[in-house]
Image: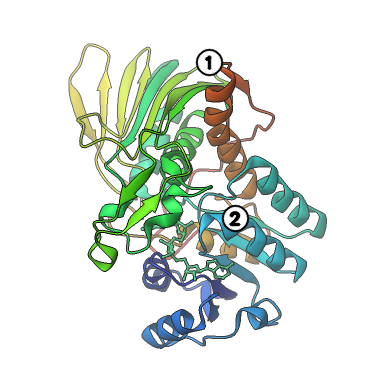
Amino acid sequence: MDKVGIGIVGLGNISAAYLKAAQNFPVLDIRAVADLNPDVSKARGQEFGLRAVALDDIFGDPSIDIILNLTIPRAHVEVGLRAIEAGKHVYSEKPLGIAFAEGKRLVDAAAQKGLRVGSAPDTFLGGSHQTARHVVDSGALGQIVGGTAYFMCPGHERWHPNPGFYYDQGGGPMLDMGPYYITDLVNLLGPVKQVLGVATMLRQTRTITAKERAGEVIPVHVPTHVAGTLIFASGAVVQVSMSFDVAGHRHLPLEIYGTDGSLIVPDPNHFGGQVELLEKGGEWKNVATDQPYWDGNFRSIGLADMAAALVTGRAHRCNGELALHVLEVMEAFGTSAETGKAVSMSTTLDRPEPLSTSLSNGQLA
Ligand SMILES: NC(=O)c1ccc[n+]([C@@H]2O[C@H](COP(=O)([O-])OP(=O)(O)OC[C@H]3O[C@@H](n4cnc5c(N)ncnc54)[C@H](O)[C@@H]3O)[C@@H](O)[C@H]2O)c1
């Protein structure tokens, strides 16, 4: 099988999940790793038996086709543009950037050079989310009316050893967790047309309780409770709430309602989970997941899909156009909150192709 050379930039918390899950996909050949902090890249390199190189050297390495950008959100576009300038494709952790304008700059720069941009989240490629997509596409829900999407927690300073970026420009619950929910919704329902939003910042500081820096107080620069309504081009209307201020709740992560049926979609922060369908007049029933990639952590499947697509020349699913649309939607919550008006999207797209049910783990087509 053809292999695609991967160079990883940014080796913090999430890199371990990528390095483990990438072993599921033979198309991925990780050839070097680098970080702003050379001690970090050296340690991760040793842990996974990979070549740690200087940041300046990874972009010029001729064995690397795709830069996998696992840096913090504020650095995503800067690192991505550097990769594009060096003639490499780039696949970034979410969000694509911290503002629509900079995300667009990256997507445009890549297009000019004939290079690809990919972006997390890739959980919508998980078997459960592909099953939900299959149910929606089958017409079992009738006409889609709308739905709900909820992520609400007390804040990541409870567990992340370095949580400052979640409360800095480019952080907040919408840019951090919104990508999972909104990407899954766009994959199910198509593009968003308009956004109505509100955003509040209830506290100026947060106290870290993760053991590494317990007791340290960090400043808050962004809204930490963001809510509103998505109006899809199809006419569907979805209520959204993303928060770092909520002690607990009992809403399900994603529900989709149609004139003939309702669907419970598992948490889009994960690949698996039980899809449930209620058909008009009936009871809730479990939907069998006849798809691969539902039982486990496949964080890197989006990168593997992009690598496999490069080999055959087809389109990749976790693409820059999708990530840019999602970024525009997320930014619109803030713009709408400031202006008190609905914000219309300038971007639109065709939904990514569903994965074939006949794939076995490690395969992508
Ligand atoms: N931590 C998680 O559970 C998690 C889950 C899903 C996605 N993510 C996403 O992954 C990304 C990274 O998160 P994390 O938790 O690993 O953060 P982290 O702070 O633990 O690690 C980020 C790493 O990037 C390096 N870095 C920062 N700027 C850089 C630059 N300009 N060039 C090179 N290296 C640079 C830092 O030195 C650090 O080692 C974020 O976009 C986050 O939203 C994190």
- Name the foreground residue: 365 vs 31: 31
- Observer able to see residue 269: no
- Name the foreground residue: 315 vs 342: 342
- Observer able to see residue 208: yes
Mark pair 1, 2: CA separation: 28 Å
Identify the residue at image location x=70%, y=50%.
Answer: 107
Write down the residue under mark 2.
118
Give the image location of residue 108, x and y in percent: 76, 49
Image colouring: rainbow
Looking at the picture, which amino acid does disc 2 mark? Gly
Give the image location of residue 111, x and y in percent: 77, 53
- Name the foreground residue: 63 vs 148: 148
Find residue 56 and report its image quarter: bottom right
Write down the residue under mark 1.
235
Find residue 309 and report its image quarter: bottom right
Give the image location of residue 36, x and y in percent: 55, 75
Identify the residue at image location x=42%, y=36%.
Answer: 133
Looking at the picture, which amino acid does disc 1 mark? Gly
In the rendered view, tell whether residue 88 sits above or below residue 152: below
Say few, some or many: other residues with alpha carbon within 10 Å of mark 2 (under 14 / 14 to 19 / 20 or more).
many
- Name the foreground residue: 350 vs 98: 98
Number of numbered markers: 2
Is disc 2 placed on a helix, strand or loop?
strand
Closer to the N terminus: mark 1 or mark 2?
A: 2
Give the farthest residue toward the right: 112
Give the image location of residue 362, x and y in percent: 42, 65
| Dots 1, 2 in contact, CB < 8 A | no
Using the image, tell me which numbered label, if any, was put on residue 158: none
Is disc 1 placed on a helix, strand or loop?
loop
